[in-house]
Image (cartoon, rainbow, N blue to C red):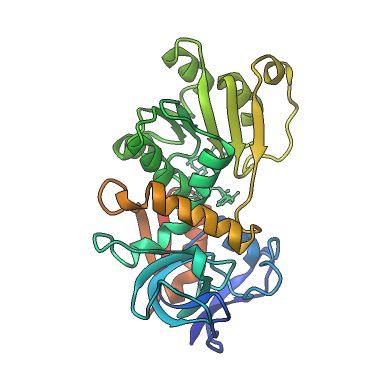
Amino acid sequence: MKAIQIQAPGADYRLVVDTVPQPKPGAGQVLIAVAAAGLNNADLLQARGLYPPPPGASPLLGVEVSGTIAALGEGVTGWKTGDRVCGLLPSGGYAEQALADAGSVLAVPGTIDLVEAAGLPEAAFTAWTNVMDTGRLQPGESLLIHGGTSGIGSLAIQMFAVRGHYIFTTAGSEEKCEAARRLGAARAINYREEDFVAVVKEETGGKGVDVILDMVGGDYVQRNIEAAAAWGRIVNIAYQKSFRAEVNFTPVLTKRLTLAATTLRGRTPEQKRAIRDALLREIWPLFGTRIRPVTDRIFPLEQASQAHEYMTKTGHIGKILLQMP
Ligand SMILES: NC(=O)c1ccc[n+]([C@@H]2O[C@H](COP(=O)([O-])OP(=O)(O)OC[C@H]3O[C@@H](n4cnc5c(N)ncnc54)[C@H](OP(=O)(O)O)[C@@H]3O)[C@@H](O)[C@H]2O)c1
């Protein structure tokens, strides 16, 4: 089968199409005939040699795909060949066929284009577990999502706006803020022109926001603490600006805040299945009607290098995808 290989992993890596053996599903796994793979920062880091896949997983790039079930491993029930699915993978998605744990796979509704569905799993799993499990967002609470037009942000806004939450979000241009409002954000803040702490304080009458999903880090660590309401929860999924910050913890103590950070890739299949089951129960029925994939651009497989380069420019709104031939 065709797959993308990393030539010269490191700062100047190149991605090339190669022919590799087709994987065989083991117990509890499904083989997916891939329609498309979603791009993630994890792929860019892995290609630079900075984020190896978990032990035993495919050395190929790609942590999410869409496609149809091509074969079932031992003990897999509930799926049949030909089913339209999307799924989270430890790695191996930039290929014509990829393996997923059956518990990390979701059926793609008929109202969603199969290629576009490739952009759903990583964002849906990440947004749900960080906001609901770690952030413990309660009915009626407000939520601040940084990077509102990122792959994660563009889906997270929809998921939690639909559930009736007041969504603040930040983005780096007026065009991105407009897109975030269309997705359901009640207040989109262009962080190049406005201070999100001041906006959140003003709009909440000084109370602050209940839960913050952050991917920026650096000076946002302190500013999130300032923007949080009493008993607020701040969850980091990345620290793109910096992993280091000098922090005054006084408001953490006085406002009784929780600061947390999690990763998805290293979790066990059972932990991912629990997130998948929560998605299925709580929100997946709204996908294809009130929640839709946000696709910025689809590249053909052989343009994987260009797709990576495009992602590093951060001009995109929503997901960047790689379509299989
Ligand atoms: N922990 C986990 O489990 C997990 C899972 C998936 C992804 N992630 C991480 O989450 C992040 C988002 O993923 P993604 O796929 O949604 O990425 P993405 O689509 O590439 O979006 C990143 C966004 O971050 C914003 N940004 C970048 N640098 C910034 C800065 N210095 N200040 C403010 N905003 C900045 C950019 O928007 P603006 O133009 O608006 O600045 C950009 O749209 C990535 O860093 C990824 O590694 C973590």
- Indicate left or right for 182 with 312 as reference: left
Where is residue 125 shown, x and y percent of the image? Answer: 50, 52
Which residue occupies the foreground of this view, 293 or 274? Answer: 274
- Indicate left or right for 42 with 206 as reference: right
Q: How many marks?
A: 0
Asked if residue 1 shows in the view, the reply is: yes
- Indicate left or right for 196 with 45 as reference: left
Quadrant housing the C terminus: bottom left
Against 155, residue 65 (above or below) is: below
Where is residue 183 shown, x and y percent of the image? Answer: 32, 40
Asked if residue 317 shows in the view, the reply is: no
Residue at left offset 71%, top offset 70%:
55
Snapshot quadrant of residue 53: bottom right
Residue that protrudes farthest toward the top in the picture: 205
Residue at left offset 46%, top offset 50%:
278
Which residue occupies the foreground of this view, 127 or 28? Answer: 28
Against 166, residue 180 (above or below) is: below
Which residue occupies the foreground of this view, 261 or 312? Answer: 261
Against 233, residue 5 (above or below) is: below
Where is residue 35 shown, x and y percent of the image? Answer: 38, 73
Where is residue 279 shown, x and y percent of the image? Answer: 43, 51
Residue at left offset 37%, top offset 81%:
81
